[in-house]
Image (spheres, rainbow, N blue to C red):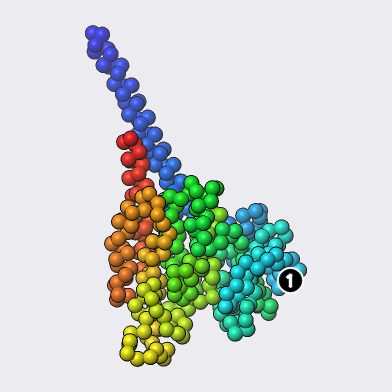
């Protein structure tokens, strides 16, 4: 055998090994990116795995039954008022060294709304919903898990902080949008039936209903206005008894007779597709102004156009939107990885 043919025979295995190593490194990179950015990784509730009627916060080893009236009175200590709305006063509180949120009824006029919110928290405990710690109906109080980053209204402030600045990327922001639409999809097919987010008559009000977790995921927090839609029995909803205005609310939520004064009796009811109409506006807010954000909006243009159909029957379901969002997310992560490979 000649020296040249010997070199070739020995070179082929070396090339094969190099190619295999390159393919393996690419595979590991894709797996790493999936684990880093995959929107299905929902670390939204540390109480996952607890039986019904129990909770477990992140620093707890075991699941604990929801706190009762006597336990809330004896063990939950209010620290300071951190929020107040028409229905509830919200306090930062402490229970056995744990920070929790204690909510009390603001006015007897809203007792029905408060009780509805408690019943929804009981029925809808899931990764998409804030964790219930306890409640006392006789005292009109409820205790939930505390999330120090607050509501989505604080998003820009949080991402501008030094410890979170590295998370100010299109990946994290699009993941938050996936979380938000996943919340809607869950509510629209929940164990308590199809529920509509009626406390969403403006962007600011909608953002205030959702909390940022320490892992930068989302949980819905305020469930005081979740009426049920049941098409099989003709049950539709109206979000309040006053006229709703502005482009944020869906067309079917606006008074259609401009020449006549608003009448709640004549106002037609509607369904959960009102939530779908608002998705593009919430996503525009969530994406902010980050590199890659324009490309995200480009990929979402078609589904957002469908969300904004005037006829609610032509809009996609929230679950359909979730599928598109996740597909866009995955393809953009793959494309960005491929670009890095080429550089």
Residue 193 horizontal side relative to residue 252, left or right? right
Q: Position of residue 3 (x, y in %)?
A: 26, 8
Residue highlighted by disc 1: 73
Q: Residue placed at 36% from the left, 73% from the top?
A: 247
- Residue 131 in the image: x percent, y percent? 58, 64
Q: Nearer the viewer, residue 241 or 162?
A: 162
Residue at the top extreme of this rendering: 2
Identify the residue at image location x=36%, y=50%.
292
Quadrant in the picture for residue 10: top left
Q: Residue at x 48, y 74 (%)?
A: 199
Q: Residue 230 or 181: which is nearer the viewer?
A: 181
In the image, 214 versus 188, the foreground residue is 214
Q: Between residue 117 and residue 55, name the one nearer to us.
A: 117
Q: Residue visible at 65% across and 64% down? A: 92
Q: Is residue 246 above or below residue 20?
A: below
Q: Quadrant of the rendered structure where residue 48 is?
A: bottom right
Percent across and percent down for residue 201 are 44, 75
State how many labels appear: 1
Local packing at callout 1 (Cα closer than 10 Å; few below 14, some 14-19, many 20+) is few
Q: Is residue 336 above or below residue 71?
A: above
Q: Is residue 309 visible?
A: yes
**Where does the image place residue 140, in percent across and percent down from the top left?**
65, 77
């Amino acid at each position: 055998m000649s020296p040249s043919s010997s070199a070739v025979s020995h070179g082929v295995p070396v090339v094969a090994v190099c190619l295999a190593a390159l393919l393996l490194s690419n595979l590991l990179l894709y797996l790493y990116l999936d684990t880093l950015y995959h929107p299905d990784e929902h670390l939204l509730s540390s109480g996952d795995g607890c039986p019904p009627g129990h909770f477990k916060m992140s620093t707890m080893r075991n699941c604990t039954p929801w706190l009762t009236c006597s336990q809330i009175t004896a063990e939950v200590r209010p620290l300071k008022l951190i929020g107040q709305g028409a229905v509830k006063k919200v306090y930062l509180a402490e229970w056995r060294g744990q920070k929790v949120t204690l909510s009390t009824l603001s006015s007897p006029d809203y007792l029905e709304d408060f009780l509805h919110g408690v019943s929804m928290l009981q029925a809808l405990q899931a990764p998409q919903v804030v964790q219930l710690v306890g409640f006392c109906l006789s005292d009109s109080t409820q205790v939930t898990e505390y999330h120090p980053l607050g509501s989505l209204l604080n998003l820009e402030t949080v991402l501008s902080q030094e410890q979170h600045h590295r998370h100010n990327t299109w990946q994290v922001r699009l993941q938050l949008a996936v979380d938000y639409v996943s919340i809607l999809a869950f509510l629209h097919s929940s164990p308590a039936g199809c529920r509509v987010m009626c406390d969403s008559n403006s962007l600011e009000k909608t953002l205030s209903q959702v909390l940022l977790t320490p892992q930068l995921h989302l949980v819905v927090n305020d469930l005081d206005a979740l009426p049920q839609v049941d098409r099989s029995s003709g049950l539709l909803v109206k979000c309040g008894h006053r006229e709703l205005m502005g482009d944020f609310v869906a067309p079917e939520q606006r008074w259609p007779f401009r020449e006549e004064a608003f009448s709640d009796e004549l106002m037609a009811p509607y369904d959960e597709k009102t939530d779908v109409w608002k998705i593009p506006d919430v996503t525009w807010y969530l994406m902010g102004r980050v590199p890659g954000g324009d490309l995200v909006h480009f990929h979402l243009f078609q589904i957002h156009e469908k969300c904004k159909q005037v006829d609610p029957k032509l809009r996609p379901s929230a679950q359909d939107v979730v599928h598109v969002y996740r597909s866009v997310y995955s393809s953009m992560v793959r494309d960005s990885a491929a670009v890095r490979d080429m550089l």
